Image (cartoon, grey):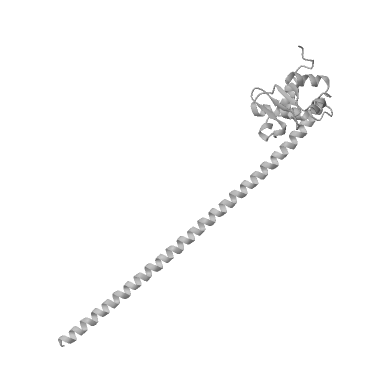
Amino acid sequence: MHRDDRLTEDRKSLIERYAADAAETEAQTRRAAEARVRRAVRAQAQRIVVEERARLAVRAEARRIMEEEARSAATAAARRIIAEEKAKLAADELGSGSVASFPRVLTACAAYRGRFGRWPTEMRVHPLDLRDLARLPSERWYQVAHRVVLTSDWTVVSGPAVRGAEGEVRCDDGIVDDDRRVADADVEDWLLSAPTEPIRE
């Protein structure tokens, strides 16, 4: 074989080797790109799953909070209704008859006790409510007077304002559920344990 033929064969082998290497490199590059795409797709899918789970968790938590708030509101409303009915019944049992302002007296005293842990010593009442309270049986009137110093006040329009050394509770500012922790029976016991005779100077 001539020398030129050998060179031609060597060049041919070299070209074939380069072509094979190029094809292998291209295949490796394509496989790497496909692997990167698969990883990116998996990562995107995982992110979507995580985001969807988070969204569902947020929705579930929001629904739970809304349901809890609804139950709390219903419970609070029921407690208010029960407290009002108990106050009315307590007023009747205490012999207050049709004295409409007396249940608010009990509620205000209970709220003060619930908020400050002590009983009030003073009570400011609208003159019309004070006139209404004056229709209480004498023994009840004396018991109220023994427990709190009654004062007429035109600015108290939505029920009495009771106060003591710790502070004041006004019915027209609203009485929250936390202020209703004192049972009506405790207010009645506190009131009924007072003397039923006039205050002696």
Q: Is residue 175 left or right of residue 3?
A: right
Number of marks in picture: 0
Of 126 and 115, nearer the camera is: 126
Q: Position of residue 102 (x, y in %)?
A: 78, 28
Of 38 and 97, nearer the camera is: 97
Q: Is residue 159 left or right of residue 40?
A: right
- At a point 81% along the width and 19% down the height, the residue shown is 139
Which quadrant would the C terminus be assigned to in this image?
top right
Of 92 and 104, nearer the camera is: 104
For residue 42, above or below residue 133 = below
Q: Position of residue 146 (x, y in %)?
A: 75, 18
- At a point 46% along the width and 62% down the height, the residue shown is 42
Q: Position of residue 147 (x, y in %)?
A: 73, 20
Which quadrant would the N terminus be assigned to in this image?
bottom left
Q: Is residue 180 left or right of residue 138?
A: left
- At a point 50% along the width and 56% down the height, the residue shown is 50
Q: Position of residue 107 (x, y in %)?
A: 73, 30
Specify the farthest residue to the bottom: 2
Specify the farthest residue to the front: 154
